[in-house]
Image: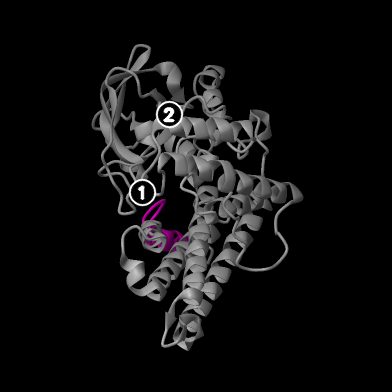
Amino acid sequence: MTAIPQPLFDGPFEGSARAAEIVARVQDFLHGELAELARAHGIDHEHGADRALLQQVWRRAHALGFYGMTLPEEMGGLGLPVLDHVLIKEAIYASGSPFAPHVFGELSGPPRVGALARQATPQQMAQFIVPVAQAEMAICFALTEAEAGSDAGAVQTRAVLEGEHYVVNGRKRFISGSPFADAAVLLASTAAEGAAEREVTAFFVDLRSPGARVESGYKTMAGQTSTGDIVLEDCRVPLANRIGAPGRGLALALGRISVNRLLHCPAMLGLAQLALRDARDYALQRRQFGRSIAQFQAIQHMLAEMATELAAARALMLGTARALDAGGAARAETSMAKLFCSETAFRVADRAVQIHGGEGIVQGRRVEFLFRMLRMYRVLTGTSEIQKNTIAKELLESA
């Protein structure tokens, strides 16, 4: 079994006793069973698993109680507070496992549907949400289009009601998890042709339906292929698959945007901790001029800056989690956390590459992958510039 890395910083665990127990068990799962599975199938961060192997991971994670833990208790989850969720996710990503995103089912599992349970009809629960929660179905969230990114309401995909079905036409771009999804939570315009007001509505769409297809082929700068386009050509979606009332799509999709922004931070910081650990260990073993480079002040200062900035980012993340658990909206704080954590994590990765020297710029080295992966987080889930807009808006409106 692979040795479980020790935390970078000493100190008491800041979550609940239940969360501490989950972290210990999930670490055993990641560094034991899943590490062996990755080795057996040649899986790493840039050589992903196929759908059959992913479903094996999902089902095993579900059997161990990890897969749906983020769901509300009434759906079989643990109803975790945000702080516990953040700490568990941070530990998962700090493990370095290529299966880290699949333990919770982040790309295609329970986190995609948990917030919809209160709006879903009994039929939608049985057809979509329960199978996703039980690791029997994969689902993606399809909002982004060529002209609808930061401006989420500018969707051009149209859904026209004809009797008991909506006829849907359009193309969704850069949809995470779509290459292995069975269904999508899809947002489309239901406004009348030429209407001045936007009306965006959410639907469950079975991607195996006639007129729906997924076009894979995107490879991100981090080398991953879990993103694709969803193309809809006269796809007939039952009226019964509409989620909530017409025009409520954006409210449903963005209703938990503050929490969702924060929940990307532990992934960034977990990966950044991995970069710092790799840089520290490399500095200790790399020798130049008769001694380890860790003895050079320039290297020590880089390591000190990396550790200090990570500690500050982590404090902001945990403080924001506590504010959300206390019932605060924390709109500015979650944007601050997303902004600061993503920028900090990338700076840490950049210095880690610098410490590795020539070894750090060779493809196939983990630190080089982390550099590319952490660069992406400055764009994903809301760019740094959009976060600054939100922070400024909240600040000015509070005057």
Judging depth in this view, the residue of 265 and 119 nearest the camera is 265
Going 59% across and 32% down the picture, which residue do you hit?
Answer: 62
Side of 215 relative to 352 (left or right): left
When the figure is inspected, residue 276 is found, relative to residue 214, above or below; the finding is: below
| Residue interval drawn in magenta | 379-393
Local packing at callout 2 (Cα closer than 10 Å; few below 14, some 14-19, many 20+) is few
Q: Amino acid at mark 2?
A: Ala
Q: Earlier in the sequence, mark 1 or mark 2?
A: 1
SS at badge 2: helix
Q: Which residue is mark 1?
A: 46
> Where residue 272 appears, x then y in whole percent?
48, 63
Camera-nearest residue between 170 and 84: 84
**Dot label at residue 52:** 2
Residue 76 at x, y percent in the picture: 66, 30
The answer to whether residue 185 is seen in the rendering is no
The relative height of residue 378 versus residue 165 in the rendered view (above or below) is: below
The residue lying at 50 percent from left, 46 percent from top is 100
> Observer-nearest residue: 395 or 210?
210
Q: Is residue 328 above or below residue 392?
A: above
Q: Amino acid at mark 1?
A: Glu
- Which is the main secondary structure of the residues drawn in magenta? helix
Q: Mark yes or no: residue 59 visible.
A: yes
- At label 1, counting other C-alpha atoms closer than 10 Å, the crowd grade (few under 14, some 14-19, many 20 or more) is some
Residue at the location (50% across, 31% down)?
56
Q: Is residue 389 magenta?
A: yes
